[in-house]
Image (spheres, rainbow, N blue to C red):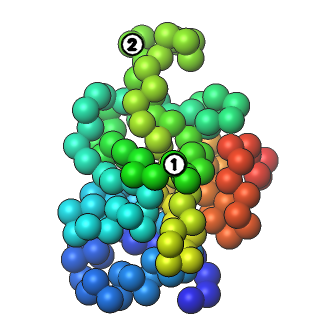
């Protein structure tokens, strides 16, 4: 497989056979939150490095792991919670809950990873995010979210998921 493949939503997952999905998991892939939930239900979490489930706690913010820089996040997004199933994840960002506007990081609750990269046993490099591509990967997305998607794609391609912004 060449390039980065994206799986967007439950319908995309439902349209692929297990063999087709396993082939994709051997390459580079970006998986959105809805697709991650559908893949978890089909037993593919071992190839994503996370399982996607109904959130146990609300979240209303996202911060890069390395520097705590905030990434714009619409309040109360509807997205799954990512739960690691391995320690071999590269966490790009964390979803957080802020009890009030302007809360410091110390006043926020770390809820779950927001975006992770996993080098799976099939040889694939997989990025899974809580966000729906229909919500976050549109022309309406602001500059911080556009930088975020560029960062994820560069990290998948280059293997440089160190939590820093790769593109200014």
In the drawing, does residue 45 fall left or right of residue 63? left
Circle nearer the viewer, 1 or 2: 1
Q: Where on the picture, by quarter, is residue 96?
A: top left
Disc 2: which residue: 99
Mark 2 closeness class: few <14, some 14–19, many ≥20 residues within 10 Å? few
Give x and y (percent) for residue 167. 76, 52
Q: Residues within 10 Å of mark 1 (few under 14, many from 20)?
A: few
Reading the chain from its start, which is encountered first: label 1 or label 2? 1
Check the picture and name the quadrant holding the N terminus.
bottom right
Please identify the quarter of the rendering in which residue 112 is found: top left
Mark number, residue 146: none
State if disc 2 and disc 1 touch (CB < 8 Å): no
Relative height, residue 166 to residue 8 (above, below): above
Q: Residue at x 22, y 69 (%)?
A: 42
Residue 38 visible, this orientation:
no
Q: Residue 149 in the image: x percent, y percent?
A: 59, 56
Height in image: 56 above or below 137? above
Residue 156 seen: yes
Q: Is 111 drawn above or below residue 143 in the view shown?
A: above
Picture quadrant of residue 17: bottom left
Which residue is nearer to you in this view: 138 or 161?
Answer: 161
State the residue at coordinates (63%, 65%): 156
Q: Mark 2 falls on what kind of element?
A: loop
Front position in the image: 30 or 147? 30
In the visual, does 102 lie left or right of 109?
A: right
Quick one: SS at disc 1?
A: loop
For mark 1, what is the residue? 87
Residue 87: percent from the left, percent from the top?
51, 48
């Amino acid at each position: 497989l060449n390039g980065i493949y994206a799986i967007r939503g439950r319908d995309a997952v439902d349209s692929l056979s297990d063999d087709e999905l396993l082939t994709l998991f051997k390459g580079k892939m970006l998986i959105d939150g809805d697709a991650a939930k559908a893949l978890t239900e089909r037993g593919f979490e071992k190839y994503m490095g996370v399982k996607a489930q109904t959130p146990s706690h609300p979240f209303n913010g996202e911060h890069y792991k390395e520097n705590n820089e905030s990434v714009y996040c619409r309040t109360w997004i509807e997205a799954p919670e990512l739960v690691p199933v391995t320690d071999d994840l590269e966490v790009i960002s964390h979803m957080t809950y802020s009890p009030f506007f302007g809360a410091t990081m110390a006043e926020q609750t770390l809820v779950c990873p927001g975006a992770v990269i996993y080098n799976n046993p099939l040889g694939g490099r997989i990025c899974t995010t809580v966000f729906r591509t229909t919500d976050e990967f549109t022309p309406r997305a602001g500059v911080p979210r556009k930088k975020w998607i560029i960062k994820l794609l560069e990290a998948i391609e280059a293997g440089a998921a160190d939590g820093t912004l790769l593109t200014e």
